[in-house]
Image: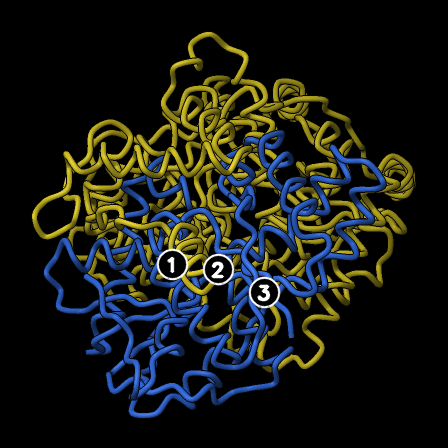
Amino acid sequence: MSHGQQPILDPVLAPPFPQAALPMLRDSQLRKNVAHATDVIQAKRARLVAEKPDWQALRSAAARIKDEALENLGAYLEQFEEQCTARGGVVHWAADAAEARAIILGILREENASEVIKIKTMTSAEIQLNPHLDAAGVKVFETDLAEIILQLGELEPSHIVAPALHVNRSQVREIFARTMGLSDLTDDPHALTAAARHYLRRKFLEVPTAISGANFLIAETGAVAIVESEGNGRMCLTLPRTLITLAGIEKVVPRYSDLEVMLQVLARSATGERMNPYTSLWTGVTPGDGPTRFHVVLLDNGRSAIRLSERERQTLRCIRCGACMNACPVYRQTGGHAYGSIYPGPIGAILTPQLTGLKHAQSLPFASSLCGVCYEVCPVKINIPEILIDLRAQVTDQERGKAARFFDPMYLGMRVANLLFSRAWLFHAAQWKARIVLRIFTRKDGWIHSLPGIGAKWTQTRDLRGLPKQPFHSWWKQRKQASR
Amino acid sequence: MRVSLFITCYNDTLFPETGRAVVALLERLGVELDFKPRQTCCGQMHANTGFRAEAYSQAKRFVRLYQDAENVVIPSSSCVAMIRDQYAGLFEELGNEQLRSEFRSLAPRVYELSEFLIDKQGVEDVGAYFPHRVTYHASCHGLRGLNLGDRPFRLLGKVRGMELVPLANLERCCGFGGTFSVKNGDVSSAMLAVKLEDVMETGAEFCTALDNSCLMHLGGAMHRQFAGMKTMHMAEILASTEQTPVEVLG
């Protein structure tokens, strides 16, 4: 917030992670907000996971359900289309963001819609729907509390479940007071939600067109499921005349009964609740009950390509619970904006570059210390560290042939190290040489306080002990000779 | 029992005292030690930085070098995790069936130090004496990679004269992450600052771990900040006795 310029959440335009992270690290307010919010959610999650003795079995079951769907994705999507269509829905297929936007705009034009209300949907942010609708003259009203904060404050989302997680309530008060004209608004949470409720009520009653995302698409029945906490979703799904649901193709699950597993793991992982307050399920259209015109836009936008590799396919199991970012020690320091994508945190670090076919966001797979906590908390057992490492290898393979990389210290260093590790005598000779070279930088106390080049990134905050006189292998050899 | 010691490249170069402590400790327990002079690196740095072909050649080298070893002990949880989590995948992708089968037979004989002591030797009390206030940092690879569980605590709990102080947020990473610490040096430093707060809060004299890489990170910051705490690999604490106390290096 106070770091000045707006963050860029477009992987094509965003600066590399280390650079984007810097202003976030310097923003004391942001770091306090993020650490506090993630600590609170994590503690709630940990408590509720601990009360499920079958938690590991639930995780495995959830992973299996998603794997089954992903392995036979085409068939399940067609089944969904068939069932949804039979019950009065209209299913559209969008290969990429531009197609999805065109389909949605086309429907809105048919409806003569000049305004639209929205439930929080990260997929719509992925395809940058709001600015495009705005440019086409359709006014968009977000109805999720966090999304209202962002929309009115002209801020960017920093988390997939709690997009305004980086904003605290005094900042919310300022935004609401300014944009709603409520000069005597306090930062009491009740006062803030009352202001939002008042702002929303008119929109729910007056705007006849809504856009939603989806948590699950059920192939068996053609139903769509949405889980939420505030009831704004329920309003958007029932009051309008027309509903457009935008869903990534990976949202499909085979059976209605799969929700038994998925809803248990999702609520506990996402918000630390046994069950989320509102779970809405609808199938096609029902005369006299809810929207009479219902469209589903199925979005690929790079997902099919991710599906091709068995290892990377795990990425598509994601149910967008955000547990990985709440637990991530990197996200905890930087918040979401440093990731240059609306998908931040560990899942963003693997999803974003893959959605661009690894053409962009190449710094993201390296934005992790590989501590593994994301894998531990993931309710669908995505082995994020394994995929991070694989993507690192793919990025390196892409880059290493380029002339510019030849003298890049990291690439050069890795090649030299590989040569040294291939022959022990070379490695040992290098140890002696390194000790002599490093002596220049070693102070009288035996420690190195400052190094040039790539080493400066180490010594900016840590000292390094000077190399000891005798490496272990040499001590061992000497000892063995002495004992003879 | 015969054990071949894989000291790891950075322990060999930067922390030879850890190696000497492992030798003292294991020989005291009656283990017959062997050290292969041709050993270098397990390939972790290359693998985790995206240099897969290089990681593969080091992994292959490791398997070839140790295939006849009765047991291999490695005083570094991240290197053991590299071998357990990544070798099979590397060999699947780049190796042949012979290499894969050599690795399958070697893998169960590769131990992290605390695993070897508890699971293979069946000892908790190694006869150590270390009259200091100590806190234990569970490295990510020890905690989640190897699931070391309470093994380190069982060993430390039997050290005479030592006061073990629990560390808050034990599961949280110190921010080292190998080349992450320089590629993302600023974020890494921020993570380190948060970790160091918890470590300093313990009021311990020493912070110990089963991984010198985390300790190099924490210890480097302690030295920079004149924090008045030192780091020490657990092998050195376990090697220390009343007769031969550990050599306390800077």
Report which residue position mark 3 lands on: B146
Classify A130 as above or below A231: above
Evaluate if marks 2 and 1 touch, with contact meaning CB atoms under 8 Å apart: yes
The chain letter under disc 1 is: B
Q: Name the residue under label 1.
A: B212
Image coordinates for residue A28, horizontal then vertical, percent:
19, 50
The residue positioned 62% from the left and 52% from the top of the image is B83
Q: Residue A109 location in percent, x, y? A: 63, 20
Residue A429: x and y in percent read 39, 34
Q: Compared to A8, does A365 lie above or below?
A: below
Which amino acid lies under the numbered mark 3 shown in the image of this protein?
Answer: Leu
**Total count of labels:** 3
Q: Nearer the viewer, mark 3 or mark 1?
A: 1
Circle 2: residue type: Ser
Q: Which amino acid, by three-letter code, is at mark 1?
A: Asn
Q: Quadrant of the N terminus of chain A?
A: top left
In this image, A131 relative to B219: left or right?
right
Looking at marks 2 and 1 on the same chain, the residue that comes earlier in the sequence is marked by: 2
Q: Mark 2 points at which residue?
A: B76
Q: Which chain's colour is yellow? A: A
Give left or right: position of A233 versus A11.
right
Nearest to the eye among marks 3 and 2: give it: 2
Q: Earlier in the sequence, mark 3 or mark 2?
A: 2
The kind of secondary structure element at disc 1 is helix
* Nearer the observer, B162 or B62: B62
Left or right of B129 in this view: A273: right
SS for callout 2: loop
